Image (cartoon, coloured by chain):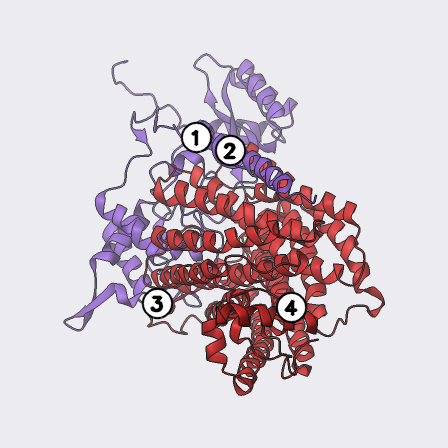
Amino acid sequence: MNQGPFIFLGCFAAMALSWFGMVLAPQLQLGGALPVRLEETNALYPSARPGLAQRGAEVYREQGCNQCHSQQVRQESVAFGTRLNGMKEDGDANAVVAALLHFKLAPDEKSAAQMIAKAPVTVEQNIAVERASFLAAKLSDAGANAAVTFTNLGPDLSRGWGSRFSAAQDYLYDATVLTGDRRHGPDLANIGARQPGHFAASWKFASTNGVDELRAWHFKHLADPRSVSPGSTMPSYKWLFEEKGGKLRPKTDAEALVAYLMSLRQDVSLPNAPLPAPPQPPVVATNAPAQ
Amino acid sequence: MQAAASQSNAASNAASNGVHDFGCLGPQAILYLAGAGVFWLTAALFLTLTASLQLFAPGFMEGCPWLHFGHVRPAAQAAFIYGFASQAGLAFVLWLFSCEGKTAVKAAGPVLLGTFLWNLGVTYGVTKIACCGGTGFQWLEFPLGASRLMLIGYLFVAVPALMTHRARTVWATAPSQWFALAALFAFPWLFITANWLLLAEPVRGVVQVSTNAWFVAGLSNLWLAPLALSVVLHGAGSVSNLNRGMLAFAFWVLVAVGAWTGLLPGAPVPAWLSSLSGAFAVALVIPAVFIVAAVLPAFAGGRIALFGAGGFGFVAVKSFAWYAFLSAAVSFPAVNSVLGFTPFMDAIQVSLLFGLAGMALLGALYRVLPDILDAPLPKPGWVTLHFLLSGAGLALWIGALLVAGVARGMELNDVSKPFLDAMATGRPFLVLALAGCALFTAGFALFGFNFALQLWSLRTRCNCAEWLAAGESSKPSAAGGRS
């Protein structure tokens, strides 16, 4: 240990190893990632943000918003369940009722029959994936349309900050990836996709709550946070506004920042980060011609 | 000729007085680095106090775009890491290599130039952060221009430090020198790579996240921690024989695992990467345990006065252990899901920055400054007061952040609680954390006054300005100095 070169070589080797592991390996795995084509819409995800929102990303960075807000939704686990979607065309309702009773999914025949009538309905949830698959198979054998379902779990998801965990794909077009390291304010990974009435615009929600009103809420929140979120510790960003005719008007940077915030959404199902499928509506008989 | 003769006389006088000869411009080089560090610590503490206050009083400085939380927090971190810790650490390394190697500081002139360039870079960088020019990357908020200046400045300081080490007349190296050498080697790799891959030719997507995490972990464990541990080991090694085998093992484990530890569970990176990083974070406990086990006996038996400059090292090594254990704890997914993103993470950061680096390097300055100025501290009693204030402040600061983090994390995990109610839970503890920070700052103010008085006392004994400008030839007399 008396030789400087010996220490240098040891440090060099250790640094090289950590660099290979933490920098080069992720680059080899993810550096060439491309947008994925979504099955439902055939659209590419993610797509580049519009120009104003791209400028907004710079404003977000310049103002240090990432010092208080994270942009990464964490997920703790997945809960599986079995859902009864309805009856097969040639299914025997009595057999399905018997299966529901046999596997103790319904307390009595009346409840089992009601389940079939109310389908789609979750017959059991928060179970192991093996049990969920087993029940779905048995109900299908009995003549029902049954499927395995899953629910993404975690406090972040329960708070409505997202429907799944944030995946590497979500950040593909971010020039600077600002995942944040503290949460003095809520996570913003999905601020553009949250139900405005529930999470973003508690001051007013009705079915009429539209994009313009949401933008107006964001402007008001930036200019005077505590007027819309009493008790918030967010500072005012009044310098992003100018006074015209006795009213605060957003400058271009404020417009851009709000455009960026409204572009933040991770609500697409990805192969490695799937979203729970919504319940299939029951098939209603119509006289439309068959496809 | 006359200057050379007087330098030779000064060297021989120094030798006869038992005072180490740092060579021509050596003391100036160390003093300017240390003095700049003290200046930036003042700025960092002011910014940290402001940021801590804004966490529960958002109206403070609300109308000032430069001093709002989004700018103050990264500026405070940058001022501490690059302004204070790096410069005070480099000043100590120069002093250490010169004293342990029993040789003069080599190429001290370029060190002065390097100090100037480094400070120019830090000033530019902090100004850019305040003026909306931050890059957004943790601990790498400076723009590329500032980093280039700092890198050139670093080379002007580090190369003379290595030259000084190479010119040593005592061949055997102490453990403190191993850690200092490792830090000198690691920093340029980390700094160049991170600037290149995040700012100059940015990698895409979440590779930025892993690269930034690698940089933060490396800067923590292979730059700041080794510099601070070098101070502690030098202090402990000067009074007792340290177990070199244990320290060598701890050194290599720290070097091997240090840069791997930055990613936390739940980060949007491949799962294998965050799992691997978490495992290495747990492994960081190994060097911490070995270093504590090797160093603590030196503090036993009153060989080092705990309530004095030596106590700073004691607090520093304890803080290192805290930092390692807390970092290991949050690398477990179950713990991280509760405590991640909360003030608990700030407690870990304060343990590293102010507990380990801050205390160790302030303790080092108490040893280095009287040595290079060849004058005692005017108010030696203030050192104890500084230690008590800083120690109590740190305990309050870290403790309050830990409690605030746990309380807030549990409330945030209870989804029946509205978000703003959950955020209000830890607020009283954030007030206590601010009080802890203020105590630490008060202690540092005593150090600052002591340092200023020391410089002032030199001025009354000789032409200090001439000494500062001209070098060793006009070094103040050793009258009243250390013998």
The hue used for chain B is: red
Label 1: chain?
A: A
Q: Amino acid at mark 2?
A: Pro
Question: Label 2 neighbourhood size at 10 Å, few (<14), some (14-19), many (20+)?
Answer: some
Question: Do marks 3 and 4 share a chain?
Answer: yes
Q: Which residue is mark 2?
A: B270
Question: Vertical placement of B39 versus A62: above or below?
Answer: below
Which residue in the structure is indicated by mark 1? Answer: A30
CB under 8 Å between discs 1 and 2: yes
Q: Amino acid at mark 3?
A: Trp
> Is the residue A39 above or below the residue A23 in the image?
above
Tell me residue A108's x, y (percent).
Answer: 62, 29
What amino acid type is highlighted by mark number 1?
Leu
Query: Label 3, label 1: how many angstroms apart (C-alpha)?
Result: 37 Å
**Is B61 in front, or is A196?**
B61
Q: Nearer the viewer, mark 1 or mark 2?
A: 1
Mark yes or no: residue B319 visible: no
Nearer to us: label 1 or label 4? 4
Chain containing the residue with disc 4: B
Of the image marks 2 and 4, the number of the one nearer the N terminus: 2
Place of residue B268 in the rendered image (x, y in percent of width and height, measured from the top left): 48, 39
The residue wearing badge 4 is B363
Tell me residue A178's x, y (percent).
41, 47
The residue lying at 25 percent from left, 14 percent from top is A289
Chain letter corresponding to the colour purple: A
Task: Please tell me which residue lies in front, B443 or B426.
Answer: B443
Report the residue marked by disc 3.
B66
Q: Nearer the viewer, mark 2 or mark 4?
A: 4
